[in-house]
Image (spheres, helix red, strand yellow):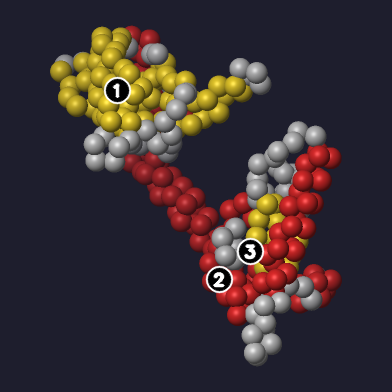
């Protein structure tokens, strides 16, 4: 800590160039931010989340070369170009008072827009708001009245699991791109699906999952998903429809899937049943 104190107080740029996807965190860069030091780093670790344009500098998270030696050469060239053409001229753009107003603007923006998100208080607030309080409330809900809610969820899961294979698709009309929204010019995905859930008590959801598949690398990359709207029910039949603007139009692969819905589940993967229908 004594060494870090001297380092932080003696520099203007915190240069960190980890090999992509191998940065553990980057707490030294966070320490630098707290002391008015600007960061120049690869978009990995904390800087991937923390980087704000106009409050530091970043090298892209994407690799150009698989060969690490070639990638290192490209990154080095990019760093030197960035330092020579942008960072150093900015630092030495002194006014009549002997300092660079634009550099100070970068420092102020860094302290104002990045530093507050990387404090122990912010971390503890997030733990309490996102996890501790929610888990405490859920625990009380599950255990009250001699675990009534917990028993209810177990019965729901058992009923759904025992009848899951009974689901039948009565109608399936789906075209990834069918029409154009005249208001924003975006292509719209269109579909109508009718499902007979038989005697399953659970509510069902339906969504379209869009992926990109690289046959050469045998790799699937998730693009986005769209949930269908439940228009009506007739007995055990559910009528779904979607007219959703595509956020990432292009050549993709897609499929539709049915899943059980229950507002008492903490998250969908708590009961990871799914039925693919196309």
Q: Position of residue 108 (x, y in %)?
A: 57, 75
Q: Secondary structure at mark 1?
A: strand
Q: Residues within 10 Å of mark 2 (few under 14, many from 20)?
A: some
Using a 10 Å C-alpha cutoff, classify the residue at mark 1 as few (fewer than 14 neighbours), some (14 to 19) or many (20 or more).
few
Which residue does the numbered mark 3 point to in the structure image? 56
How many numbered marks are there? Answer: 3
Label 2 and label 1: CA atoms lie apart by 45 Å
Name the residue at 80% across, 45% down.
Answer: 72
Displayed quadrant of residue 81: bottom right
Bin the neighbour count of mark 3 within 10 Å (Cα to Cα): few under 14, some 14-19, many 20 and up: many
**Quarter containing the N terminus:** bottom right
* Residue at 49% over, 50% down: 131
The quadrant holding residue 225 is: top left
The residue sitting at 25% across, 23% down in the picture is: 240
Estimate the x, y position of residue 10 in percent, counting from the top left: 79, 76
Front tag of 3 and 1: 1
Could you tell me if the residues under marks 2 and 3 are in contact, i.e. CB atoms within 8 Å? no
Residue bearing the label numbered 2: 109
Front position in the image: 243 or 152: 243
Q: Nearer the viewer, residue 96 or 63?
A: 96
> Among all residues in the image, which is located at the extreme left?
234
250 or 2, which is in the foreground? Answer: 250
**How far apart are the alpha carbons under marks 2 and 3?**
9 Å
* Local secondary structure at mark 2: helix
| Residue for point 43% across, 25% down | 209
- Point out the residue furthest to the bottom here: 97
């Amino acid at each position: 800590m004594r060494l870090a104190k001297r380092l932080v107080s003696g520099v203007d740029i915190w240069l960190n160039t980890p090999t992509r996807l191998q940065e553990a965190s980057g707490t030294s860069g966070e320490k630098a931010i707290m002391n008015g030091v600007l960061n120049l780093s690869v978009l990995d670790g904390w800087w991937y989340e923390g980087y704000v344009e106009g409050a530091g500098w970043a090298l892209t998270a994407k690799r150009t070369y698989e060969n690490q030696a070639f990638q290192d050469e490209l990154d080095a060239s990019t760093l030197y170009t960035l330092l020579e053409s942008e960072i150093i001229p900015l630092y030495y753009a002194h006014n009549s008072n002997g300092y660079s107003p634009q550099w100070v603007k970068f420092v102020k923006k860094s302290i104002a827009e990045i530093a507050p998100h990387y404090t122990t208080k912010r971390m503890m607030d997030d733990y309490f708001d996102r996890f501790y309080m929610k888990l405490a409330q859920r625990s009380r809900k599950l255990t009250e009245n001699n675990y009534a809610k917990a028993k209810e969820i177990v019965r729901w899961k058992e009923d759904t699991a025992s009848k899951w294979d009974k689901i039948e698709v009565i109608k399936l009309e789906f075209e990834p791109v069918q029409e154009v929204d005249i208001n924003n010019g975006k292509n719209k995905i269109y579909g109508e699906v009718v499902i007979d859930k038989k005697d399953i008590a659970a509510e069902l959801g339906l969504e379209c999952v869009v992926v990109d598949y690289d046959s050469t690398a045998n790799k699937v990359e998730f693009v986005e998903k769209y949930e269908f709207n439940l228009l009506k029910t007739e007995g055990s039949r559910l009528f779904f429809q979607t007219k959703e603007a595509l956020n990432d139009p292009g050549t993709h692969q897609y499929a539709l899937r049915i899943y059980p819905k229950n507002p008492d589940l903490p998250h969908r993967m708590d009961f990871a049943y799914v039925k693919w229908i196309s």
